[in-house]
Image (spheres, grey):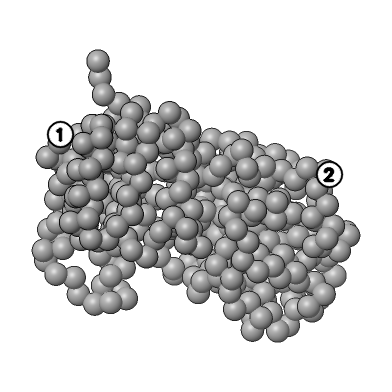
Amino acid sequence: MRVACVNQDGGIQPDRKKGAAVHLREMRRSFAALGAEVVAIDRSDSAEIHQLLNEAWQEAPLDMVYERYALGAKAGIEFATDRNIPFVLEVNSPLIDEEERWRGPVKEEVRSLERLIFLNAAIIVAVSSEVSRYVLDQGADPERVSIFPNGVDNDRFCPRKESDPLRAELVPEGRFVLGFHGRLRGWHGFERLAEASARMLAEGLPIHLLLVGDGEFEEALDNVDIEHVTRIPWVDHDQIPRYVACFDALPLTYQPDVPCYFSPLKLAEAMACGVVPVVPDVGDLTKVVEDGRNGLVFAGDDLEAFIKAIRHLVQDGEAHRRLAEGAVETAASMSWKRIASYILDRTRPQG
């Protein structure tokens, strides 16, 4: 198959240091790994998109247009409709809701265009139940909407090898590592993790924070002794697996009142490395993490319950080992290739 992978969001380029760029790259890699010829198009101007799609078609017909949804972007579906080929839309957030929350009212013509695109897409891949609900509310056909949380490259994210010395370089011997990787944002609730860490250290739990990425961590960590924290600046995503494999647990401390449409990239990546997730009962997190099987779940507004969960992992090595194995098993079914395969199988030309 010949697939045009279109991205009309100027803020998301394949080489950007952000999760959306990782998603973009990984889907393209997965299509290619499954045998598709990928035509990558990253432009925000509709005329340029049309031109590049037409040039690609002149080289050889395209079999499908796959697009990461951007508000007001219509060139992809216009081209696919004109050429009578499937248009597949990846939707990662309720963009109109976000636009109105942060920038102001959205014009009715933008709303109408969104409804038209959702109605006419052959397949819509929603990243969460909340995003799926948003898409369906705009008139999408339920039979064309599928939910896939963000995936993982299982070839690169895997448990730490005994021969890898990185853990010993980063963490004092005998400590239980609570990890964070990515770009720190307000909705991560990192101040709650910092408060819990200070309390756990005060009671003598041998925890250590390993923070990999960008963010203003220092202010929140005022009450945490610096000897119990390792800070690593932003690392290229191809290098991240080694660092994530140094974690023992991935604590997520999202507040219950944050929007629940997200699907954290870091979750599947950590689980694939045998890192035990400790997550609040918000959004779709509990659709991935089953309490007691592949991680631990706590009531999102209960800091005591969060601390209790971490304490359990630190003090019960057998429980930690069992949950780590469950995490790896779950992540094995969350590959980017699985998503790409689903799409290719349903858009492949017949005959």
Q: Is residue 121 above or below residue 235?
A: above
Residue 282 makes an appearance in the image: no
Mark 1 to mark 2 CA distance (whole Å): 53 Å
Judged left or right of residue 179, residue 16 is left
Residue 34, x across and y down, in percent? 45, 30
* Mark 1 residue element: loop
Query: Foreground: 35 or 313?
Result: 35
Residue 246 makes an appearance in the image: yes
Residue corresponding to mark 1: 84
* Mark 2 residue element: loop
Q: Residue at x 52, y 39 (%)?
A: 335
Residue corresponding to mark 2: 163
**Which quadrant: the C terminus?**
top left
Query: Foreground: 191 or 241?
Result: 241
Q: Residue at x 63, y 44 (%)?
A: 157
Mark 1 residue crowding within 10 angstroms, few (<14) / some (14–19) / many (20+): few
Q: Is residue 300 above or below residue 239?
A: below
Q: Residue at x 59, y 78 (%)?
A: 216
Q: Is residue 348 above or below residue 27?
A: above
